[in-house]
Image: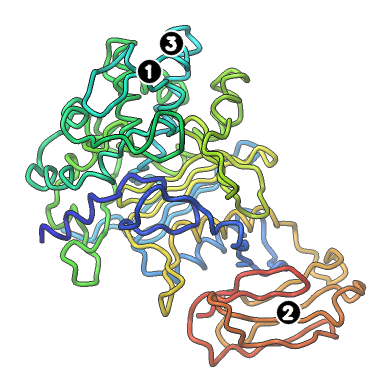
Amino acid sequence: MRHFLFLFIALLFQTSALFAQAHLLQQLPVKPHSLSARQPPALIQRDFNGTLTETLDYVFDSMTALTPIKGFNAAMLLPDGSMWKRASGLATELPTSTPLTTEHLMGMGSISKSFVATTLLLLYEDGLLELGDSIGQYVGPYPNVPGSVTIRQLLSHRSGISDYLNENPATGNAWLENLDSIWVSDTVLSYYVLAPNFPVGSDWSYSNTNYLLAGRIIESLTGQPWYEVVRQRLLDPLGLTHSFVYPWETPEEQPFSHVWADFDGDGSVEDLQGIGLPDAGLFSIANSAGCLISTPEDLARFSERVYGGHVLQPATLAEMQTDYEQSASGFLYGLGAASFPILNNVENWGHDGDLLYKSVALYFPTENMSLAVQQNDDRVFDPADAIPILDVYVVYEALLEAYLNYSPASGTDDALQAGAFVMYPNPARDFLTVKWNALDESFPSTTCTLMDVNGKIFFSQIVQNQQVDISIASLPSGIYWLQIGGITRKVVKI
């Protein structure tokens, strides 16, 4: 049993690399190299006769009905200020079964880093520090923590400092031996950080240790616990009444969802709190690197306020959104903020998080819209599975695609834009119907191809009519891609 408990602590607080579906046991740094090759899902029929909120409900319900994940919670802050919310599944299984609601809290994992970075940047705007200051001016010394690292390098993961969670097995062993203990950052920084990975500033490597140090810098500057400063500077002013720094703050009467994971290695997931696993120690060892709990509603509001320019001064926000990761993957990482190459690179800023609970929260400046989705289950999508699990990242993509492509249905084919095609039903069981605008002369003589996630082709023909019906009754349940004229969309077979 100790072996499987250790697997839980290993790599818990990584940046999950949105839509890359990194497993907990993969070695960091995890970067979304494969994201640009992925296509947005087409999970609604474009002639679905409903309002935007009804369409979002339809997509959310369709997706979550197809997956064994125990519970999903989602919220979208729309440009008019209204909030769409939806939940499905279970919040608890033991000692009794409780439905998940939009009010249930979950761990946000590494999205906590965005809260900590924003707080430190507010202190910078107050003149209490400079981003080029060395961290040795404020904290330490600690073994294996170079005091010459600047605050900018710390927040952008260019410090080279080893990750105490992902790179030192002793951390997991110590947690296992003290499951009920509340950890303090000084203990971790003094005893559980290995030698640096590279010279300061010479490379990029995601490290939770950076944000333990960021929390300590906040404390050095203010003389207060870092979590009190986060509350004073962000949570209370922004009205984030569903967000708490756990376990130093407790949600009191607000419901806190349990989390499911394979505790004993038998291939099935268990309700961890329900079987008696303490969670306060787990969250405390994450500390300022990943211990906040929240709802998608609060995460959507936080994302819009910060990345929409309502919290930081323009020059500070520009600094936060400067790319310090500097790779060719399209993934950007600034100061506690990331941008992901999704949906033809629609502009976005935010973070994702993984503390068994999994969370994604992004703001889309060109849309003035923010979307957050959480799940209370450790399982993730793996295209190699016979029936891939649809996880928080797949649901997120589906909702985003539905929003970006929504338009009120006219009920006529003439309303279709030239070159656009619709496919329905999706999810589908026996047949998939594909239609496009007959006035568009570019589609006739175009090949229509249906393939699985590994590229195996199940259907391919030249399309010369306005409609083609594809039999999929014999295909196994799972994810497929439909490609026509250079456009690729996702098909869910049930």
Residue 450 point in image, percent of width and height: 64, 81
Say what secondary structure mark 1 lies in: helix
Q: Residues within 10 Å of mark 1 (few under 14, many from 20)?
A: few
Quick one: which residue is furthest to the top in this view? 127
Q: At 11% from the left edge and 43% from the top edge, which residue is drawn?
A: 174
Q: In which quarter of the image is residue 295?
A: top left
Q: Upstream in the sequence, badge 1 or badge 3? A: 3
For the residues labelled 3 and 2, the Cα–Cα distance comes to 59 Å
Report the residue marked by disc 2.
434
Residue type at numbered disc 2:
Val
Secondary element at tag 3: loop
Neighbourhood count class around disc 3 (C-alpha, 10 Å): few under 14, some 14–19, many 20 upward:
some
Amino acid type at circle 3 is Leu
The residue indicated by pointer 3 is: 129
Horizontal and vertical percent position of residue 169: 19, 47
Does the residue at mark 1 contact the one at mark 3 (Cβ under 8 Å)? no
Picture layout, residue 311 above or below residue 465: above
The image position of residue 16, as x and y in percent, is 42, 50
Chain-order first, disc 1 or disc 2 = 1
- SS at circle 2: strand
Q: Name the residue under label 1.
A: 232
Pointer 2 local density, CA inside 10 Å: few below 14, some 14–19, many at least 20: some
CA separation in Å, label 1 and label 3: 18 Å
